[in-house]
Amino acid sequence: MPNRQYKIFIKSIHELDESYTGIEIIDADNTEQTVLSFIRKSEKERDFLIVVTNFTPVERRNFVIGVPYKGTYEELLNTEMLEFGGTWTTPQPDMKSVNQPYKQFEHTIELVVPAMGTVYIRPKRIYGLNKNKKA
C-alpha cells in the first residue's frame, strides 16, 4: 500500500474515534446476505474509507452499496488478496458510481465482496464536496 494511501487508511480508522461523526452506516440491515457496510470518516471530508464485510462463506458478486459522492472509487485493501492469506492475485478494478438511490445515498457502486472477507474502498476521484471542508 503506497504511503499516502496508508496515511488515509490510518486517519480514517481513528481520527474521529471519539465522535459519533466518525462513522456512518451504509447498511446494517442486510440479514439475507449477512453483509455490513459503513463509512469511517476523518476530519477532511474527502478522506474517508468505505468498509464492506461479508460474514458468510459465500462470495457476493455484483454487490451494490450506497456511496456519499459521485465519482470513482478504488479498492485499498482486500482481505482475500494473496498477501493476506487469500486466493485473489489482482485487486478489483476501479468502481465508477451510478446515479441510483440506495438508502440515504444518491449514488451506488458495484463490487465483489469476498467470502468471509472485508474490502476497504477509498474515493479516487469524487465530485460534489469542498476539498478543504472539515467533517
Image (cartoon, rainbow, N blue to C red):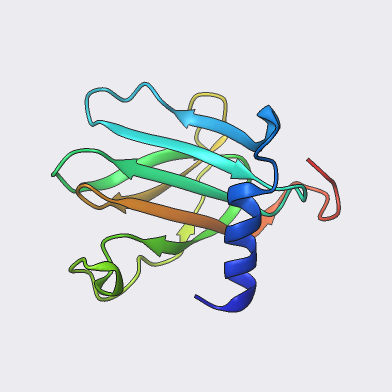
Q: Is residue 51 visible?
A: yes
Residue 85 image offset from top left, x and y in percent: 22, 68
Q: Nearer the viewer, residue 13 or 2?
A: 13
Residue 120: which quarter of the image?
bottom left
- Residue at screen point 50% across, 24% down: 103
Picture coordinates of residue 72, whole percent (x, y): 55, 59
Q: Residue at x 45, y 46 (%)?
A: 51
Q: Nearer the viewer, residue 6 or 65?
A: 6
Quadrant of the image occupied by residue 89: bottom left
Residue 127 horizontal side relative to residue 13, left or right = right
x, y percent for residue 39: 55, 40
Residue 95: x, y in percent? Answer: 45, 58
Q: How many marks?
A: 0
Residue 70 seen anywhere in this rendered image of the structure: no
Q: Is residue 135 left or right of residue 59?
A: right
In the image, residue 91 above or below residue 105: below
Residue drawn 51% across the image and 47% down it? 50
Image quadrant in which the C terminus is located: top right
Identify the residue shown where x is 83% and y is 50%: 130
118, above or below 79, in the image: above
